[in-house]
Image: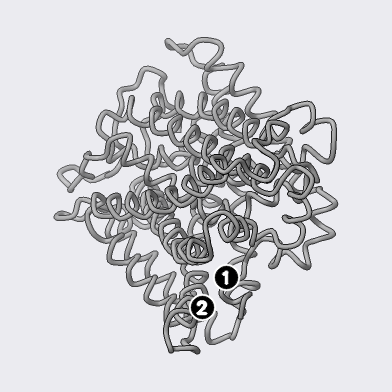
Amino acid sequence: MKLRANEPLQSGNTSEPGAPALRQTLGSPSIVFMVLAAAAPLTAAAGVLPLSFLFSDNFAAPVYFVVATVLMLLFAVGYTALSKYVPNAGAFYAYIAAGLGRIPGNAAAMLALGAYSLTVIALAVYAGPFASDLVATFTPWADSPWWLWSIVAAALLALLGYRNIDLSSRVLAVLLILEGAVMVILATVIFISGGKEGFAAAALNPVQSFAHGSPASGIMWAVLCFVGFEATAVFRGEARNPGRTIPRATYGAALAIGLLYTFVATAIVTGAGTADVLALVAADPAGVLFALADEYIGPWFSAVINALLLGSIFAGALSFHNVVTRYQLSMGSSGLLPAFVGRVHGTHRVPSNASLVLSIVTLVAIVAAAVLNLDPVLQVFGPLIGILGFAVLAMMAFASISAIVYFGRSRQPRPGILVRLIAPVLASLGLLWVLVMSLTDRKFNRMRPSMARVLGLETRSAKEG
């Protein structure tokens, strides 16, 4: 795949003349909702954000989310620049192929397709035991099988994924607004109440964050909270004016996630106090938000958060479902997958064939897990989500390297040096550093046997039961 820098933009969504094309109706806000839902902010805030405190052993962890936001914005510079010069909805694999060649590009295609598909399966499976526990908490039905609710979730994903993309975007917008609202409300109440010791300004002190504990581990977990935001370019074939919509959506998503997590992390320190926050996190990482909600608002608000966590899980599954089907569409159109998945539905104007294939794979995986009596959390969800984090970090790093190579050898008009060189170089170095840290962190490896508890892979109601 060799593309000229001045080649006109194309949707890249079909290879057959006269075939139905994707409906280009998505604006920047709709795409932002899609990718923020993939990042599952409430799920990340409850289960992953506290790990930045835990593994860094530092109460100034909010600074790490500022650093992670800067790193994601640096990555977005080269990434969105490539989206204008490489007119393909294949995102990672198209961009990596444009700079590094067809073989690395195809490898990235399979890595992206595999990692994102496994994430859909993981979230659909995880929705099952979570829903079962919530049903047991709020109804007389105490022993509903997890696989039943996972199948229900998979059926809903199939229905929404097969239909018009606007329907999915509206569902995701509602779920995302609700989960974002509960986090903002909790944090705001903590700040208004004054917290335990007043506003914890020390939590935003970079000297404290880098002079103590393990800042590399803190940054690593902060970056992992952003996984999902990079999927903006996948929707370029359905975006209005993709040359402007995709960059705006990418920067908007990175900023929104970064500000939200920094806000919530600072509220956690303010609510628990700088002297006690690490003990609170160490005692029960997944219970931090619930403990603060109980203290500052009331147990009823903890129940609301618990219920909305299920919505956050489903929203993440739906968003990744849409991402996978767009990858399949692009790969089917280019010959990397059968042409069947590269076709657009004549009425819904979405990759319905690809959605159908993914829905069948998801259903088969759920049934297989149930028949094999696998633990849906420890043996399915945890390992598959771990694959996603490492895969995305690797693809982001290589996409940044690809931007450097692509613009460096281009003989056509190209962006300024900040866009084509400085930002991608900084992003590449930062992402590779985070990737190495995530693979070699000794504290993480020592705690791996107990990661189900640490990651919050048990629902609140199950713990209380």
* Residue 306, x across and y down, in percent: 50, 65
**In what element is the residue under mark 2?**
helix
Query: In the picture provided, is 141 more to the left or to the right than 404?
Result: left
Please give the label number shown on residue 133: 2
Q: Which residue is mark 1?
A: 459
Q: Amino acid at mark 2?
A: Asp
Calculate the distance from the C-alpha at mark 2 to the C-alpha at mark 1: 7 Å
Q: Is residue 103 visible?
A: no
Q: Quadrant of the C terminus?
A: bottom right
Res 91 quadrant in image: top left
Judge whether 127 appears above or below 26 on screen. below
Residue 255's spot in the image, x, y percent?
A: 49, 32
- The residue lying toward the viewer, choosing from 420 and 8, is 420
- The quadrant in which the N terminus is found is top left
- x then y, percent, for residue 232: 41, 39
Which x, y percent locates residue 168? Answer: 29, 54
Quarter of the view holding residue 63: top right
Q: Please tell me which residue is depicted at 56% across the width and 57% down the height of the picture.
A: 293
Q: Circles 2 and 1: CB distance less than 8 Å?
A: yes
